[in-house]
Image (spheres, grey):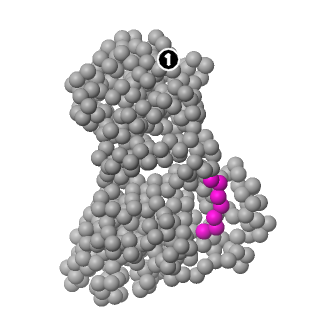
Amino acid sequence: MKALNKRTAPKSQAPERIIQFGEGNFLRCFVDWIIFNMNQKTDFNSSVVIVQPIEKGMADMLNGQDCLYHVNLQGRLGGEVINSLTRIDCVSRALNPYTQNQAFMALAEQPEIRFVISNTTEAGIAFDPSCKFSDAPASSYPGKLTQLLFHRYKTFDGAADKGLIMMPCELIFLNGHHLKECIYQYIELWKDDFAGDYEGFKDWFTNYCYVCATLVDRIVPGFPRKEIAQIQEKVCYRDNMVVQGEAFHLWVIEKPENMSIEALKEEFPAEKAGLHVLIAESEKPYHERKVTLLNGPHTVLSPVAFLSGINIVRDACNDPVVGQFIHKVQFDELMQTLNLPMDELKQFAADVLERFNNPYVDHQVTSIMLNSFPKYETRDLPGLKTYLERKGELPQGLVFGLAAIITYYKGGKREDGTEIVPNDAPEIMQMLTELWKTNDTQKVAEGVLAATSIWHEDLNLIPGLTSLVKADLDKIQSLGMKEAVKTIL
């Protein structure tokens, strides 16, 4: 079997126009796959320079394969089962700024560079006041980016056409807004280092650099340990950087304040390439849609499925009872609380169910159960309140899902003898243990709903909620989970 590199496999050449902070599985399976497709299907003609954001990373491994690797997409898409392998060749090289700081800073001098894309984890977009302008490099991602931007400003004497378009992919709502704020904080922190260039640099960044908030959506399990031998045999290369992801993808990019949608589409022609990339006025409604219609059902289906004897999300979708429950929560309840066109919401919800039903991923429902109460607070509680406001009644499925979480947190054993092992903050676990010791579902319901440390309010004040949660707890105790679910369908 051949090693994978540019001597054994063809590799396209294109100008380096994108700096990518992050070399992990997600960016390589999502962003670089998108750029590869844009190069194939439009005149985008761009390659990516990967910058390793922390001291220890995979830059050397990538360079060992000349940054060639395969993406294995699996799942259902439009009813069709997908299991594809694509060799990605749009990454030109990978840099470690901790050992190659000169080469990293030299990126600012390349006139064709136009985009900065990142995924440095949720903790990556943060201001660290201990960073110094003289650090080589600054430890934080926004610090490194500010150093790079200032060097570009100086190199091209503040030219309007040398500003950069930044599209962070960190899983933070309004990630671009946070990144922009951090850069301004570094500009203020280092104003003395910039000396006479402080005002000019700040104006150049404000007027000629463009920071977008984005929402990314693709499940990326990562390196396919179980199937790697089969994949390598299939592609006929010894590829140690294969990355596996689901077939579905969505990237919502919020236009920056100082650029029009049309101008951004022209520069980043993903839509023209037939990709599911939306350039929009605001990412907020799409963020709400994802959290509500994907994460929301996940949070309540998990305890209902597990306590019904079901371990895998796909099996829960296909179960005649639990599948109906998921459909009810998603279509009849949560969907009614959103403000996007109904046709669009129905299509997204159908896509979500198709993703839940992925034949290649055994997604354990227990993996979703970690920190269920905080998840319910952000993903399901807003929908419960909006539904009550709009319909004048509580959504039965969402309330039942909350009762199911409370029951799961009781612990003990499932009917088949499987141990129930809830996992949350120690104070939450302690509270549930004490409440269930009373063996009084009224006290359990009232106690959980009164926990302002979880909900930031007393949910007993929501009309009818306490009595409905108690009634559901009683049904689950007396009938068992699956029979109790049937009563609300």
> Residue at horizontal 57%, vertical 48%?
79
Q: Residue at x 46, y 54 (%)?
A: 217
**Residue 435 location, x and y as percent?**
36, 17
Q: Kindly give the residue lying farthest to the front in the view shown.
A: 343
Q: Quadrant of residue 407?
A: top left
Q: x and y percent of residue 259 in the render?
A: 28, 72
Q: Position of residue 307 (x, y in %)?
A: 52, 24
Quadrant of image for the C terminus? top left
Place residue 451 in its image quadrant.
top left
Q: Nearer the viewer, residue 471 or 396?
A: 396
Magenta span dominant secondary structure: strand
- Between residues 143 and 81, which one lies in front from this camera angle? 81
- Report the magenta residues as a range: 82-88
Mark 1 neighbour class, 10 Å CA radius: few under 14, some 14 to 19, many 20 or more = some
Q: Amino acid at mark 1?
A: Glu
Vertical side of 426 occupied by 31: above or below: below
Q: Quadrant of residue 315?
A: top right
Q: Position of residue 189 (x, y in %)?
A: 25, 69
Residue 274 showing in the rendered view:
yes
Q: Name the residue tied to disc 1.
A: 483
In the image, is 25 to the left or to the right of 155? right
Residue sticking out furthest to the right: 1
The quarter of the rendered structure image containing the N terminus is: bottom right
Q: Is residue 80 magenta?
A: no
Q: Residue at x 74, y 66 (%)?
A: 237
